[in-house]
Image: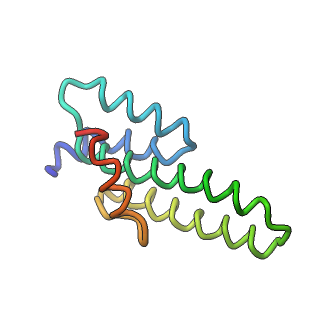
Amino acid sequence: MTEQDIDKGRQNAIISYITIFGVIIAYYLNNEDAKKSTFASFHIRQSLGLWLTFWALGYIIGSFDSWLVTSSFYLFFAVLFVYGLSNAIGRKAQTVPLVGDFYQKIFSNLGS
């Protein structure tokens, strides 16, 4: 990724971490350009994976009647989202720990 590509896609990368609707908006904004930003595509894949995993596991975690399990779940995903967002703000293309490489692999056809 070049500095020009990072500058071009940084805004979309940051938008993608702000709610699930941010992922959708960032995806369409990134595809709207004549030349897609690989930096934005990278972060869109990361945040989409985080949001989908959050919702899928949240449904299962919701069946537990324990504040310890629920609060641990929210804390875990809050740390992952903050890590991804700080990488987008800091102009880095680092995967989210534990699951980031998996997200890049399964969403490889998404973006550029």
Q: Position of residue 78 (x, y in %)?
A: 59, 63
What residue do we see at 32% from left, 55% from top?
Answer: 104
Q: Is residue 25 above or below residue 95?
A: above
Residue found farthest to the bottom: 68
What residue do we see at 42% from left, 66% from top?
Answer: 99
What residue do we see at 57% from left, 43% from top?
Answer: 19
Q: Is residue 67 left or right of residue 50?
A: right
Q: Nearer the viewer, residue 80 or 85?
A: 80
Q: Is residue 64 left or right of residue 93?
A: right
Q: Nearer the viewer, residue 61 or 22?
A: 61
Q: Position of residue 41 (x, y in %)?
A: 30, 43
What count of labels does the image hold? 0
Quadrant hosting residue 103: bottom left
Quadrant hosting residue 7: top left
What residue do we see at 55% from left, 35% from top?
Answer: 21
The quarter in which the C terminus is drawn is top left
Residue found farthest to the left: 2
The colour scheme used to paint the residues is rainbow
Q: Position of residue 32 (x, y in %)?
A: 30, 23
Q: Nearer the viewer, residue 108 or 46?
A: 108
Q: Is residue 9 left or right of residue 58?
A: left
Q: Position of residue 28 (x, y in %)?
A: 38, 28
Q: Is residue 20 above or below residue 105?
A: above
Residue found farthest to the right: 65
Q: Is residue 4 above or below residue 90?
A: above
